[in-house]
């Protein structure tokens, strides 16, 4: 059996299973949580870049 046939058989099992709706809901919850985490981490990265830039400027001025 090729991989595509195996994939279609597994997807058919998921599509006919009534528990699939719960899996989709959990997937949406996880996606929302991940978006929140990415937003927080990107903001931390921007703030950290500003702090490091400031420290680099201050150290450069102190070493002159």
Image (spheres, rainbow, N blue to C red):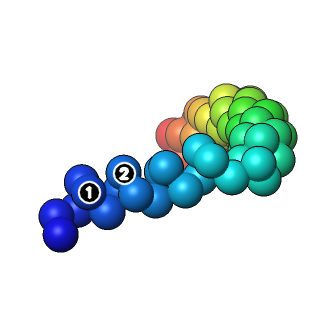
Relative to 26, say whether 47 is above or below.
above
Q: Along the horizontal axis of the image, is 56 left or right of 22?
A: left
Whole-percent x and y of residue 27?
73, 44
Taking depth in this image into account, of 34 and 8 the one nearest to the observer is: 8
Q: Quadrant of residue 41?
A: top right
Query: How far apart are labels 1 and 2 at the CA level?
Result: 5 Å
Q: Secondary structure at mark 1?
A: helix
| Residue 24 in sight from this viewpoint | yes
Please report contact status of discs 1 and 2: CB closer than 8 Å, yes or no.
yes
Residue 25: horizontal and vertical position, in percent? 81, 40
* Residue drawn at the location 40% of the way across and 57% of the way down: 9
Residue underneath mark 2: 8
- Mark 2 Cα-neighbour bin, 10 Å: few <14, some 14–19, many ≥20: few
Front residue (pair 35, 26): 26
SS at mark 2 in the image = helix
Residue 55 versus residue 26: which sits nearer the camera? 26
Extreme-left residue of the structure: 2
Q: Is residue 3 left or right of residue 14?
A: left
* Observer able to see residue 33: no
Q: Residues within 10 Å of mark 1 (few under 14, many from 20)?
A: few
Q: Residue at x 55, y 56 (%)?
A: 13
Relative horizontal placement of residue 61, taking residue 34 as reference (left or right): left
> Height in image: 51 above or below 30?
above
Q: Position of residue 35 (x, y in %)?
A: 73, 34
Disc marking residue 5: 1
Question: Picture quarter containing residue 36?
Answer: top right
């Amino acid at each position: 059996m090729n991989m595509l046939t195996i994939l279609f058989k597994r997807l058919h099992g998921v599509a006919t299973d009534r528990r699939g709706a719960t899996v989709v809901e959990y997937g949406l919850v996880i996606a929302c949580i991940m978006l929140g985490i990415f937003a927080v981490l990107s903001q931390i990265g921007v703030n950290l870049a500003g702090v490091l830039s400031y420290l680099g400027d201050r150290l450069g001025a102190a070493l002159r």
